[in-house]
């Protein structure tokens, strides 16, 4: 009896000794990741402002557009635009801007002069009326990864596992996000831009929303609703500010990067706390590292290669394989939880 008491006392002392170390380690991880996230957000904001619209301020471009407008757009018997341009709502003035942009860009490349952005965009070669065809393709492929995941989630996640509706919701939010990304990169209008940015912001906030529910094992519906309200209010304020006060690109980048960084830190801390118990616990940390690395492509802003691939389109391409990797982790975690009867609830347990 005395030996059991001494063993219990020794184990308690060992826990007391290791707990501060574990807490300090988690604190250092959180602080380091916060610094990295904010630094990336700051650099990305600065990069996004560089050469924002230097091309459309050039006198050569302004004169070219004016001449094209007077020569082509005000003729009584002007030639109609090709069908793909009409279907994607190109106007004669839009076409003049596109033609002048590429004429000046081709001359600049031949003379080894810097390539400029026009109206906040690099000079891309359009395809079937789409302004940025590579980004459109990669956005659709990202969305398709979520479409493929939907039936897998429905088959693999038991009805009585409390995270099932949230993971299915994640797939729906992902499909919506990448759909509007494809629309925006097809035609850049204020309306499509807002739908793209707000959908992306919603997806990032939803990621934090379900992550906290999962990691804290928040099974109570009332608690879930309260936490959902806590997430919804700042999201609506964010959208309201960008809509009614100022569409600030730097602020939007910083806000979404911060929420994304917090989301990643939750999973990194979870990995640290569960690496001994769960053999797959390292996967969310690796996913966080990969998504952060892919995000760095946004910093490397450069003119599009062959008029097609720029840093932003490559960022969209890099996220395509990361989507199924993340779903694979969610399914592994679900399988472990259900097998160990964690989060498997009766109807009354959720009330």
Image: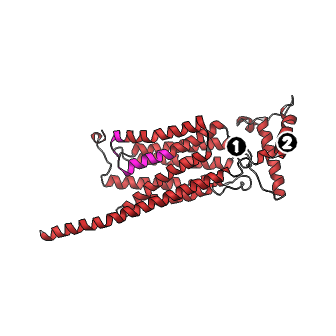
Residue at position x 45%, y 56% in the image = 265
Near mark 2 (Cα within 10 A), the count class, few <14, some 14-19 or many ≥20, is few
Q: State the residue in front, 165 or 226.
A: 226
Please check the rendered image and state whether residue 211 is part of the magenta-colored stretch, yes or no: yes
Label 1 SS: loop
Q: Is residue 52 left or right of residue 40?
A: right
Residue at position x 86%, y 34% in the image = 70
The residues tagged by marks 2 and 1 sit, at their Cα atoms, a distance apart of 25 Å
Which segment is the magenta one? 204-223
Residue 142 at what x, y percent from top left? 57, 49
Secondary structure mostly seen in the magenta stretch = helix
Contact, CB < 8 Å: mark 2 with mark 1? Answer: no
Residue at position x 74%, y 46% in the image = 118
Q: In this rendering, is residue 141 above or below 4? A: above
Label 2 SS: helix
Mark 1 = which residue? Answer: 130
Please check the rendered image and state whether residue 38 is part of the magenta-colored stretch, yes or no: no
Q: Which mark is residue 63?
A: 2
Q: Is residue 236 left or right of residue 86?
A: left
Whether residue 317 is visible, yes or no, is no
Q: Quadrant of residue 16?
A: bottom left
């Amino acid at each position: 009896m005395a030996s059991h008491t001494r063993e219990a006392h020794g184990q308690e002392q060992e826990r007391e000794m290791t707990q501060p170390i574990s807490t300090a380690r988690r604190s250092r991880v959180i602080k380091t990741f916060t610094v990295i996230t904010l630094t990336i957000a700051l650099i990305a904001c600065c990069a996004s402002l560089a050469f924002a619209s230097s091309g459309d301020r050039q006198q050569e471009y302004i004169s070219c557009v004016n001449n094209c407008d007077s020569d082509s757009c005000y003729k009584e018997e002007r030639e109609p635009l090709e069908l793909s341009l009409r279907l994607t709502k190109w106007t004669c003035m839009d076409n003049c801007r596109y033609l002048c942009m590429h004429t000046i860009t081709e001359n600049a490349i031949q003379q080894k002069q810097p390539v400029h952005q026009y109206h906040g965009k690099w000079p891309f070669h359009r395809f079937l009326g789409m302004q940025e065809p590579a980004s459109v393709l990669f956005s659709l492929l990202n969305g398709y990864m979520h479409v493929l995941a939907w039936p897998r989630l429905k088959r693999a996640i038991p009805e009585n596992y409390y995270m099932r509706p949230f993971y299915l919701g994640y797939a729906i939010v992902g499909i919506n996000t990448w759909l509007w990304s494809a629309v925006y990169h097809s035609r850049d209008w204020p309306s499509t831009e807002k739908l793209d940015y707000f959908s992306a912001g919603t997806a990032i906030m939803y990621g934090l929303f379900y992550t906290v529910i999962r990691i804290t094992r928040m099974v109570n519906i009332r608690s879930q609703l309260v936490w959902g309200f806590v997430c919804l209010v700042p999201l609506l304020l964010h959208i309201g500010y960008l809509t009614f006060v100022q569409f600030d690109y730097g602020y939007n980048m910083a806000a979404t990067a911060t929420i994304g960084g917090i989301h990643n830190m939750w999973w990194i801390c979870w990995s640290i706390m569960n690496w001994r118990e769960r053999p797959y616990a390292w996967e969310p940390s690796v996913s966080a590292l990969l998504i952060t690395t892919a995000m760095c492509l946004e910093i490397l802003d450069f003119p599009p290669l062959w008029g097609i691939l720029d840093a932003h389109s490559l960022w969209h391409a890099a996220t395509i394989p990361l989507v199924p990797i993340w779903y694979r982790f969610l399914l592994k975690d679900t399988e472990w939880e259900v097998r160990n009867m964690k989060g498997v609830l009766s109807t009354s347990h959720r009330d």
